[in-house]
Amino acid sequence: MTSSSKRKEEVHVVNGGVKQSAWSKAISCKAVWEEKDEFLDVVYWIRQIIAVILGVIWGVAPLKGFLGIVIFCVINAGVLYVYFSSFQQVDEEEYGGTWELTKEGFMTSFALFLVVWIIFYTALHYD
């Protein structure tokens, strides 16, 4: 087992012995993040989940063009901003500012969104 896989399986001890994984912290309001990279990983993977969901929706509802891209960007950035500023209430300055958290993993989620959108649109609406 590599050190990176051990790190991902690692759980943290919180509240006098209660173990809490990164994903349970991700859905807990105002969670304490001991490692900066752990929170950034959660932000990254939430973006990927949003990209797949919106790509499927955009492909099923025959949304086309620049409007679809703009709506994706607004939803993706908006949801993550609300997540880290209101739900988790992290100090943005610890992570390099609001802009750094807002753009964390954005381009990979945008590429994933485009691939899923194109595949679903082509499969369902191409004549």
Image: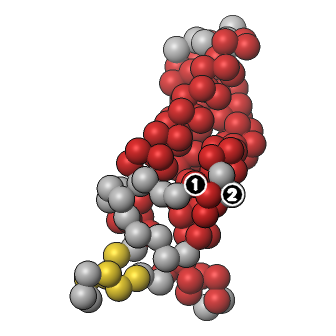
Label 2 packing within 10 angstroms: few (<14), some (14-19), many (20+): few
Element on which disc 2 rests: loop
Please state, as top left, top right, bottom left or bottom right, where the C terminus lies in the image.
Answer: top right
Is any part of residue 30 visible from this angle? Answer: yes
Q: Nearer the viewer, residue 68 or 124?
A: 68
Rendering coords of residue 27 (x, y %): 35, 56
Q: Are marks 2 and 1 in contact (CB under 8 Å)?
A: yes
At 24% across and 88% down in the image, what residue appears?
Answer: 16
The image quarter in which residue 68 lies: top right
Vertical arrangement, residue 26 with respect to residue 11, above or below: above
Element on which disc 1 rests: helix
Vertical arrangement, residue 29 with respect to residue 48, above or below: below
Is any part of residue 45 visible from this angle? Answer: no
Label 1 packing within 10 angstroms: few (<14), some (14-19), many (20+): some
The image quarter in which residue 62 lies: top right
Q: Nearer the viewer, residue 53 or 11?
A: 11
Question: Residue extending furthest top?
Answer: 127
At 65% across and 89% down in the image, what residue appears?
Answer: 2
What residue sits right under mark 1 in the picture?
92
What residue sits right under mark 2 in the picture?
96
Rendering coords of residue 88 (x, y %): 41, 54
Vertical arrangement, residue 99 with respect to residue 29, above or below: above
